[in-house]
Amino acid sequence: MTRMDKDLYPFFIVLFLTVVALVIFWSVLDMVVLGASLAVVLLPLHRRLLQYTRPVLSSAIITIGLFALIAGMAWATLMILQANAGLLNQIFATIGSWLDNPAIHPEAFGIPISRGTLSAWLSKGDSLFVNYWATLTDNLLLIVLKGLIFFISFFLLLLKGKALKDRVDQFLPQPVKNYVDQLMPVTVDTLYVIYIVQIAIAVLTFFIAIPVFYLLGYGNILFYSFLAAFCELIPILGSSVAFIIIGAYALARGDMYGVLILFFLGYLVVSALPEISVRPVLVGRRVKIHPLIMFIGIIGGILTMGIVGFVLGPLIIVLLMKSYRIWTDDRKGAQGTAVQETAREAGP
C-alpha cells in the first residue's frame, strides 16, 4: 500500500460521512443552503464591521439584523392579511360555491381539470391566505426548527466560512485549488444577483400590477398588488398564484372581461414576462450567461428542488458554464504551448 493510498483514507471517510449527513438531514438541507448563500452575499458587510468589532460580535449583529428584518416583514404581511380577511374570505367562499355548482364547473365546458384538483388548489390557497394562523400553528414546530437551522447555519458560515475555506484549501492539490479559486468570484456574483433580482422583481411586480387591478375595477387595488408582489417574493409561489386566485374569483362571478384582463395583462405581462425576460437577462448579464440558459436553470431548479432550487438551479448552471470555459481555456493554452515548443524544436 503506497503512501498516497493511505493519504486518501481520510478523504474517503469524510466523503462517506458527508453523503450520510446529506441523506439524514435532506429535509432541512434547504435551510442550510439558503443560510450559506445569504452568508456569502452579506460577507462584505461582515468584513466592514470587522474594522470596528470582533468577528463573533459582527456575525451576531448581522444575524440579529436579518432576523429582525424577516420577522418584521412576516409581521407586516400577517397584519395586511388580517386587515383584509373579509375580502379574502369572500374571494375563497365565492370560488368554493362556484366549484360546487356542476352547471358552471369547468368540466361542463370540456376543460380537463378535475373537481378534486381544483378543490386541492382551493384548499392550499385557503390555508395560505385565509386560515394562515391555523397553518402556522399546525406547522409551528417545523417552522421553528427550520428557522433555527437557517439562522445557525447563517451565523456559523458568516463567522467561520473563510477559515473553513482556508483549511480546505490546505489539503487541495494545487490544480484543484486554482480551479476552485476561479469559480469563487462567479459563485459570489451569482448568489448576490439572485437575491437582489428577486427583491427587485417583487417591487416591480407591485407597481406594474397597480394599473391591471385598476382596470379590473374590483377596488382594493393596493392590496391586490401587494398580494401579487408577496407571492412573487416567495420563489415557490410566484405572482402567477395571485393572478390565478383572483382570476378564478372573476370567473366565479361571471366576469369574463375581468378574466381576460387578469390573463392577458396580469398573468402574461405582470407575472410571466419578468420571469421569461427580466430575471434571466439581469442574472445572465452579471455572470455572462445567455438569458435562455439562465431561464432553464431558474425554472428547472424551482420545479425539481423547491425553494432551494431558487438558489441552486441558476448557480449550478453558472458553475457548469464557467467550468466549461475554464476547461476550454486550459486546452487552448496547452495547445498553444505545445505549438510553441514544436516550433522551437524545429527551428534552426
Image (cartoon, rainbow, N blue to C red):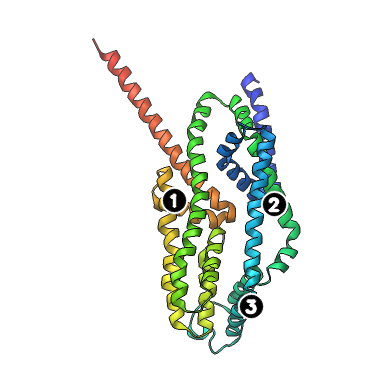
Q: Characterize the local packing of mark 1: few (<14), some (14-19) or many (20 or more) Cα atoms within 10 angstroms.
A: many
Query: Looking at the picture, how far across and down is residue 32, in whole percent?
Result: 65, 46
**In the image, is residue 289 above or below residue 230?**
above
Q: Is residue 154 visible?
A: no
Task: Name the foreground residue: 225 vs 251.
Answer: 225
Q: CA distance from mark 2 to mark 3?
A: 30 Å
Image point 67% across, 28% down: which residue? Answer: 9
Q: Is residue 94 visible?
A: yes
Image point 63% across, 69% down: which residue? Answer: 81
Numbered label attached to residue 294: 1
Image point 59% across, 74% down: which residue? Answer: 117
Numbered label attached to residue 146: none
Q: CA distance from mark 2 to mark 1?
A: 29 Å
Farthest residue to the front: give it: 52
Query: Looking at the picture, how far across and down is residue 334, in whole percent?
Result: 38, 25
Mark 3 residue type: Gly
Q: Characterize the local packing of mark 3: few (<14), some (14-19) or many (20 or more) Cα atoms within 10 angstroms.
A: few
Sequence order check, earlier mark of 2 and 1: 2
> Which quadrant would the N terminus be assigned to in this image?
top right
Task: Name the foreground residue: 8 vs 181.
Answer: 181
Sequence order check, earlier mark of 3 and 1: 3
Q: How many marks?
A: 3
Query: Looking at the picture, how far across and down is residue 298, in whole percent?
Result: 49, 53
Numbered label attached to residue 147: 2
Mark 1 residue type: Met
Mark 2 residue type: Gly
Task: Find disc 3 in the rendering and name its residue.
Answer: 86
Farthest residue to the top: give it: 348
Q: Give the label, 2 or 3, closer to the camera.
A: 3
Tag 3 secondary structure: helix
